[in-house]
Amino acid sequence: MDILIFSPDGKTAPFETGLADALPGARTRSWQPGDDNAADYLVLWKPNAEVLKPRERLKAIFNMGAGVDAVLGVDGEGARRLPAGVALVRLEDAGMGAQMVEYVSHAVLRYFRRLDELAELQAQGVWKFLKPNRIAEFPVAVLGFGTLGAQVAGGLAALGFPVRAWSRSARPGRENVTLYSGADGFDTCVSGARVLVNLLPLTPDTADVLNAKLFAKLAPGAFVINVARGGHLVEADLLAAMASGQIAGATLDVFRTEPLPADHPFWRQPRLTVTPHMSALTLREETIAQIAGKIAALERGEAITGIVDIQRGY
Ligand code: NDP
Ligand code: OXD
C-alpha cells in the first residue's frame, strides 16, 4: 500500500514515519513536484492542483484538518478537480475539541467578567467597581453544532451560560443547549445574543455569514468570536459595528489573508484580540492515529466516518 503525503510547508517527514509505523507494510512518501505515480491514499493539507491530479489505485484522500475549504474551494472549483469517485475524509476532533472549548471559554469569560475593561482601568491606575453581568441574562449563540461546535456549546452550558446553537439539520440539542436550524431558526438563535461564536465550515452557504445584518440582530454591545474561517467574516462590517458600539469587541483566530498583513486595521483595534490560527491545532499523534485507523478500516473493507459530502461542502 502506498501513502502519498503533502503539506505546503514541506513538514511531512514525521507523518511519513508515523503512518509507516502505524501501518506495517505501508510505503509512505512525501510528494515532490512531478510525482504523478500511483498511490492508494493521499494525506494532505492545502493541496495544489498537481497533487490532486487523478492517480492510479487512489482510494481515499485524507485532509489533515477539520475544514476542507482549502481542498474544495469556497465556490466549489476545487471539488471539480477532485478525482471522481474518491472519498475525501476530514479530521474528526483528533484533540481539537478540547482546545476549542478552552479557547472559546476563555474568550467568553474574559468578556463576561469585564476583564478587558478592568485591565484598561488598571492601566489608568483607577480603582473602580464594575457592575457584574448576570450569567442567566447572558445568552451565547454558537453557529455550527458539529464535532467542535457541540463541544464548545456544551462547555459554555456547563459554565452556566444559556446557550443556543445553529445547525443545518433539525435535531434535538443537548443538555442546556437549545438547537435551531434553517433561516427562521437562525434569527431566533442569534437575536439578542450577548456573544456570538462561529464554528461553521466555510461553504458557499456560509461565506460572509458574519455581516452587518447579523451584528444588528445581536444585543447592543455584543462580542464576536470567530474560530472557523476568515471567509465567514465581512471585515469592514465588523469594523463599522465596533465603531458604532453595536459590537463591543471580538476575538479572531482566522482571517481572509493569513498571516494577517502587517498593515491590517485589526492589529490596531484595542478591543480586538488577534491570534494566529491556533485556537485548535492539528495534533500530530492524534492525527496519525486517526488517519491510520481509518486506512486500516478501509483496507478491511469497513465503513469509516468523516467522509465529506462534496455537494454540501463539509
Ligand atoms: P462539522 O462538519 O462537524 O460541523 C459543522 C456544523 O456546521 C454542523 O453542525 C453543520 O450542520 C453546520 N452547518 C454547516 N453548514 C451549515 C449551514 N449552511 N447552515 C447551518 N448549519 C450549517 O465541523 P467541525 O465542527 O469539525 O469544524 C467546524 C469548522 O471549524 C471547520 O470547518 C473549520 O473551518 C474550523 N476549524 C478551525 C480551527 C482553528 O484552529 N481555527 C481548527 C479546526 C476547525 P449539521 O450538523 O446539520 O450538519
Ligand atoms: C482545521 C484547522 O480545519 O486547523 O483543522 O483550521
Image: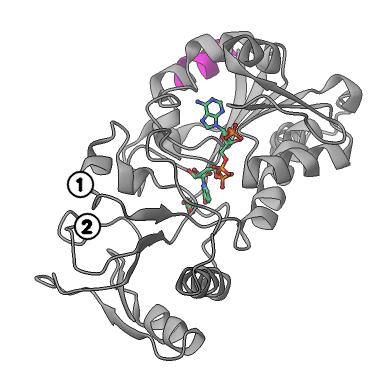
Taking the magenta stretch, the answer to whether it contains residue 66 is no
In the drawing, does residue 227 fall left or right of residue 41?
A: right
Q: Can you tell which quarter of the image residue 183 is in?
A: top right
Q: Splitting the image into four quadrants, where does ligand 1 fall? A: top right
Give the secondary structure at mark 2: loop
Whether residue 15 is visible: yes
What colouring does the structure picture have? one colour
Residue visible at 46% across and 90% down in the picture: 24
Give the secondary structure at mark 1: helix
Residue 271 x %, y %:
58, 31
Whichever of labels 2 and 1 marks the residue nearer the N terminus, that label is 2
Q: Amino acid at mark 2?
A: Leu
- In the depicted view, which residue is nearer to us: 55 or 189? 55
Q: Are marks 2 and 1 in contact (CB under 8 Å)?
A: yes
Q: Which residues are magenta?
A: 239-245
In the drawing, does residue 12 fall left or right of residue 198?
A: left
Residue that mark 1 sits on: 81
Residue visible at 71% across and 52% down in the picture: 102
Residue 45 x %, y %:
35, 60
Quarter of the picture holding the N terminus:
bottom left
Q: Is residue 7 above or below residue 1?
A: above
In the drawing, does residue 50 fall left or right of residue 74?
A: left
Q: How far, Cα to Cα, is label 2 from label 1? A: 7 Å
Residue visible at 40% across and 47% down in the picture: 68
| Residue 52 image label | 2
Residue 131 x %, y %:
89, 23
Q: Is residue 133 above or below residue 199?
A: above
Q: Is residue 209 above or below residue 314?
A: above
Q: Residues within 10 Å of mark 2 (few under 14, many from 20)?
A: some
